[in-house]
């Protein structure tokens, strides 16, 4: 899978840009604040509907500028598809192959973009929400129907939480306990199946990139005691949930973590090791995507050269280039050692929101 063309209008300081991209390594170089990250952000938005930089979508659009619009031609399994997103009245409007799409999930399924950026170490040291999102993205791209299952689960969770806050009666809560349990089971099962495969792939990658930490084990907390049904767990904690005003058991409370023989808890890792661990997770997820889809996702590396030393940059890039993945890499400069070993197929200079192709 690769982006053949990317057009950007009204995204942060980029008023207008039209890029023709190579299938391999594409490098974006320029000073801080030039707009390099915004180019990568555009590709990511077409895959996720959200930014890796902010949860506030209103900050993406230029002030008093044109509407925010993104367009891409993406080649996937020998098929050329057209993707478009327009930000209007505080919401995204999507188009897929020239037709309006009422479900953003249809657009996201056609474009798989993975990202490593300065905050990616939070996958290891941050909160559970980011790890659940990482996990669900992987499941979404290998399990048909996961988006619909998640919508059903989230709807049931919202309804139960409303009842808890409003002190709803026992009969209504019992009905929504049953619906939430029915919706949660396939979500939990899909996650567990994916995690089992992910753990195997991750162990192989970690042996290559972090051998000094010893054997790695992936630990999973599903969000409730899986020896009983979620319906039973919800019934057992109902009074506590009423007091708190929200549901304390279920897939929305799930988490996973990596424990090493020589560093059993994340707090024992250095910041550099956290970053290497995060990139190992990305590389493992790329492998699973390739096994399931027969192609690689698109990879964006924002400021990779400030996040890892040259040896580990080369190791990560080498693994991905060998896989055939398209890579979009940004930096204020690219080390000569890296440039010599992995000469980019396309080179862009970015300054004051202007993107100019150099090669």
Image (cartoon, grey):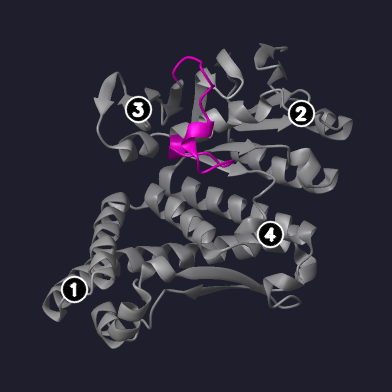
Q: Quadrant of residue 277?
A: bottom right
Q: Secondary structure at mark 1?
A: loop
Other-residue count near label 3 (Cα within 10 Å), few / some / many at <14 / 14–19 / ≥20: few
Can you say which quadrant of the picture contains the C terminus?
top right
> Label 4, label 2: how many angstroms apart (C-alpha)?
26 Å
N-terminal of the two: label 4 or label 2?
A: 2
Q: Is residue 86 above or below residue 65?
A: below
Q: Nearer the viewer, residue 314 or 251?
A: 251
Q: CA distance from mark 2 to mark 3?
A: 31 Å
Separation of disc 3 and disc 4 at Cα? 40 Å
Query: Is label 2 in contact with label 3 (beta carbons under 8 Å)?
Result: no
User: Is residue 179 or residue 256 the one in the foreground?
Assistant: 179
Camera-side residue: 128 or 220?
128
Q: Residue at x 35, y 84 (%)?
A: 240
How far separated are the C-alphas under marks 1 and 3? Answer: 35 Å
Q: Earlier in the sequence, mark 2 or mark 3?
A: 2
The residue to which callout 3 is attached is 89
Q: What's the magenta region?
A: 47-67
Q: Quadrant of residue 178?
A: bottom left
Instruction: Give the residue at mark 4.
Output: 277
């Amino acid at each position: 899978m690769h982006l053949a063309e990317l057009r950007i209008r009204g995204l942060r300081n980029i008023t207008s840009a039209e890029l023709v991209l190579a299938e391999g390594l594409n490098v974006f170089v320029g000073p801080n604040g030039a707009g390099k990250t915004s180019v990568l952000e555009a590709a990511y938005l077409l895959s996720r509907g959200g930014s890796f930089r902010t949860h506030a979508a209103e900050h993406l659009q230029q002030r008093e500028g044109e509407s925010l619009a993104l367009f891409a031609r993406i080649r996937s399994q020998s098929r050329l598809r057209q993707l478009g997103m327009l930000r209007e009245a505080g919401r995204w409007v999507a188009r897929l192959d020239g037709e309006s799409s009422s479900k953003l999930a249809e657009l996201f399924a056609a474009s798989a973009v993975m990202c490593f950026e300065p905050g990616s170490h939070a996958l290891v040291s941050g909160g559970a929400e980011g790890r659940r999102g990482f996990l669900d993205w992987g499941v979404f791209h290998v399990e048909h129907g996961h988006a619909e299952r998640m919508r059903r689960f989230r709807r049931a969770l919202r309804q139960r939480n409303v009842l808890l806050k409003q002190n709803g009666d026992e009969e209504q809560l019992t009905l929504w306990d049953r619906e939430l349990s029915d919706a949660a089971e396939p979500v939990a099962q899909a996650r567990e199946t994916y995690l089992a495969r992910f753990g195997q792939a991750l162990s192989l990658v970690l042996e290559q990139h972090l051998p000094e930490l010893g054997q790695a084990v992936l630990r999973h907390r599903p969000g409730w005691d899986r020896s009983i049904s979620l319906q039973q767990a919800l019934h057992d904690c109902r009074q506590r949930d009423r007091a708190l005003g929200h549901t304390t058991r279920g897939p929305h409370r799930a988490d996973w973590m990596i424990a090493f023989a020589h560093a059993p808890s994340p707090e024992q890792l250095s910041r550099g090791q956290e970053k290497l661990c995060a990139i190992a997770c990305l590389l493992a997820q790329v492998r699973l995507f390739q096994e399931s889809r027969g192609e690689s996702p698109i990879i964006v590396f924002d400021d990779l050269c400030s996040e890892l030393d040259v040896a580990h940059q080369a190791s990560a890039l080498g693994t991905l280039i060998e896989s055939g993945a398209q890579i979009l890499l940004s930096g204020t400069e690219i080390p000569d050692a890296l440039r010599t070993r992995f000469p980019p197929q396309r080179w862009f200079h970015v300054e004051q929101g202007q993107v100019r192709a150099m090669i």
